[in-house]
Amino acid sequence: MTAIPEIRQFLRCATPQGWIDAALQAPEELLIDHANCELKAAQTAQGLMWKYGMNNGEKSPYNLEPAIAFALLNKMSRLAREELRHFEQVLGFMKKRAVAYKQLSAARYAARLRAEARTHEPAKLVDTLLIGAIIEARSCERFEALAPHLDADLQKFYLSLLKSEARHYQDYLGLAGRLEAPEVIERQLDRFLDAEVALIESPDTEFRFHSGVPA
């Protein structure tokens, strides 16, 4: 099972073995937080549709060119549907394994990445899309890293997610590339990917799907 080459090349580090070990020791938290991640991904996509996919008035900073707005609506709509379907599938695994859906605190990962984003539009949208690409890429990489260590049913499920997660990564990058010059995209990605490495490789206070290695 080799990782998708483009994503391996895109990310600046592999998931540490310590995180994989922690995941295998916390199977309930893994499923619960995986469900949370799928739900949050769907909510993020829907939020982008509402905020940027329609005309918000003549002077609104959120208005995109119609072709880009329609592309965002179509791609985010598909992404949201797929993420919700994945959410339902994870719930199915939880039900079969008698794992109760309980509240877990959020990982630091996404919030720390988004704290690096620019705050003015349309730069904020571009950075949100780039961060979305990084999150999807890391999810894809972690599904593949975990798969060999899981039981047959969960392994099959996690491997089945690779194609859609890789496409989500590409969709986010593609949309960002329609809004900003290549050199700006490269500069911002450089910043975010450096921050992502620090989050993945530094000790974390607790295990989550996107956490670093728990201390």
Image (spheres, rainbow, N blue to C red):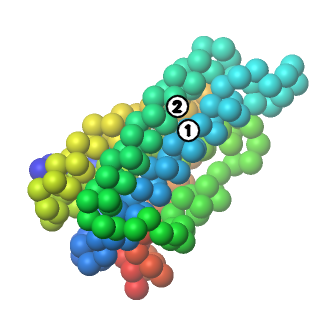
Residue located at (61% from left, 55% from top): 114
Q: Amino acid at mark 2?
A: Met
Instruction: Report how far apart the C-alphas of labels 1 and 2 lie in the structure.
Output: 5 Å
Residue located at (26% from left, 78% from top): 25
Q: Quadrant of residue 86?
A: top left
- The answer, for residue 196, to whether it is visible in the render is yes
Who is closer to the viewer here, 53 or 153? 153
Badge 2: residue crowd in 10 Å (few <14, some 14–19, many ≥20)? many
For the residues bearing labels 1 and 2, Cβ distance under 8 angstroms: yes
165 left or right of 120 in image:
left
Give the residue number, with chain letter if any, for mark 1. Answer: 45
Q: Quadrant of residue 72?
A: top right
Relative height, residue 169 to residue 97 (above, below): above
Q: Horizontal and vertical percent for residue 192?
A: 52, 54
| Disc assigned to residue 148 | none
Give the residue number, with chain letter if any, for mark 2. Answer: 76
Relative height, residue 58 to residue 110 (above, below): above
> Which structural element holds mark 1?
helix
Q: Horizontal and vertical percent for residue 146?
A: 22, 61
